[in-house]
Amino acid sequence: MAPPRIKFDPSSLVPAVRQIEDSLRILLVDGQLAPGTSLPSVRRLAMELGVHFNTVAEAYRLLASEGWLELAHGKPAVVMPRSVPPTPDASWAEEFRERLRGLAAQLRSKGIPADQIAAELRAVAEGISR
């Protein structure tokens, strides 16, 4: 079985670090990257994606700060078990709302109706919670 692929679009307006971080987080939440799994080295993934190694390193650091990854110098990043969900801080709702507003505005500007956006959000949320 092939390892899960990180989705990355170099032509996207979304910063590369955010794309890598979000793609990995989706794989983690969906269970496609199980605890104990070693991720590609920073340099290897950077070469595969065509980005600077510091971009991948920053994405790994952000996920480590959320408790998803264990980082140790000279060793691969390893997926950590998360048996107890973290407690969100007070700023999560506003940050989440702003990101959703941006996505919704982008979709609406492409002519996608609000009810279709809402249906897609429900489908994604339900798919993650399974």
Image (tube, rainbow, N blue to C red):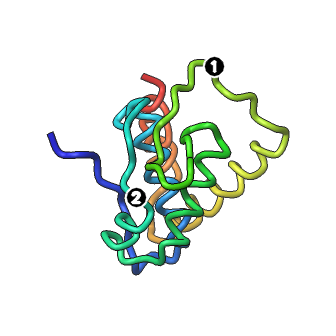
Vertical relation: 106 (above or below) 94: below
Q: Which sits earlier in the primary sequence, circle 1 or circle 2?
A: 2
Q: Residue at x 17, y 45 (%)?
A: 2
How far across and down, in percent of the image, does residue 94 sit? Answer: 78, 49
Outermost residue on the top side: it is 83
Q: Position of residue 85 (x, y in %)?
A: 64, 24
Which residue is identified by label 2? 41
Q: Nearest the camera: 103 or 27? A: 27
Residue farthest to the left? Answer: 1
- Residue at disc 2, secondary structure: loop
Which element carries disc 1, helix, strand or loop?
loop
Residue 26: x percent and y percent?
A: 45, 44
Q: Residue tagged by mark 1?
A: 84
Q: Residue 50: give x, y in percent of width and height.
A: 36, 77
Please, what is the three-letter code of the amino acid marked with disc 2?
Answer: Ser
Residue 101 position by quadrant: bottom right
Q: Residue at 29% of width from left, 53% of height from top?
A: 5
88 is higher (above) or lower (below) than 130:
below
What amino acid type is highlighted by mark number 1?
Val
Which image quadrant is residue 61 in? bottom right
